[in-house]
Amino acid sequence: MTLSQKALCVHLLTATGAIFAMLAMLAAVDKDWALMFLWLLIAFIVDGIDGPLARKYDTKTNAPEFDGVLLDVIIDYLTYIFIPAYALFKSGLLPGWTGWFAMIIITFASVMYMSDTRMKTKDYSFSGFPGCWNMLVLVLFALKPAFFVSLAVVAFLAVVMFFPVKFIHPVRTQRWRTISLPMALAWTGFAAWAAWVDFDPASWAHWGLMITSVYLLAAGAVQQLIYGKDG
């Protein structure tokens, strides 16, 4: 294969996320939440792979006919935001007006965040919570906290999207990557395990999800405290 063909294949790989998004949405409509999250996790894995491949084969130069960044943003909005917001609304975890509030604030704040040109920092972290609602909603499905706890977490993270607080990218943020990348892989494994057992509360996967989620949420802020905003 030529370099241009390899770069085109990376775009095609990214585009498969749209298929997994549709499969996840069909499962969500049927309220098969475990299957929905399994499809979203597959899309999550593809999203973790295609970025390094795009940089390796320089898709901007070798397959410029397709905008890989735009393609990625479209799929991320579906899989990270739109479908998880729908699931949170329809699941009953947030009853009545709280479900409406969460759905509206997630979809509206996230589309503004994803169009914000200041969302990336110099060390390839994110400035503000990066709209990883798929990860949060999966944890809420697994732990099933009281509705006011879920509502408070959603509201807090929606606000923090627009505060200059760092959140690491486990692949691109170089500092602590030897810890962050295994943590992200472990989170994916625990998430798949939790969904596979249909969020059985007796599953040890829930403990793994809590530990890895706390690290992934807090690591960037801790780095910021230690090394400074531009460190």
Image (cartoon, helix red, strand yellow):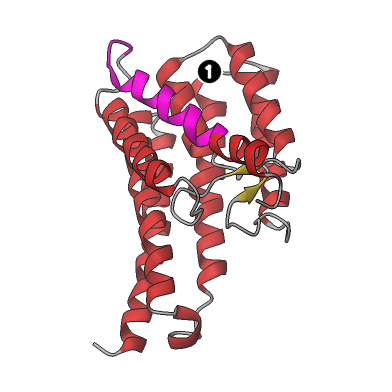
| 101 sits to left or right of 138 | right
Q: Nearer the viewer, residue 231 or 162?
A: 231
Query: Crowding at label 1, few (<14), some or many (≥20) Cα neighbours within 10 Å?
Result: many
Q: Which residues are magenta?
A: 201-218
Residue drawn at (44%, 84%) of the image: 63
Q: Please name the residue that numbered disc 1 is placed on.
A: 93
Q: Nearer the viewer, residue 185 or 31?
A: 185
Residue drawn at (76%, 40%) of the image: 163
Q: Nearer the viewer, residue 193 or 22?
A: 193
Q: Nearer the viewer, residue 208 or 158?
A: 208
Task: Residue 7: give x, y in percent of width and height.
Answer: 37, 80
Picture quarter with the N terminus? bottom left
| 33 sits to left or right of 133 | left
Q: Quadrant of residue 133?
A: top right
Q: Amino acid at mark 1?
A: Leu
| 163 sits to left or right of 179 | right
Task: Residue 44: give x, y in percent of width and height.
Answer: 40, 48
Task: Residue 68: give x, y in percent of width and height.
Answer: 50, 72
Residue 177 seen in the figure = yes
Magenta stretch contains residue 217: yes
Q: Quadrant of residue 166?
A: top right
Disc 1 secondary structure class: loop
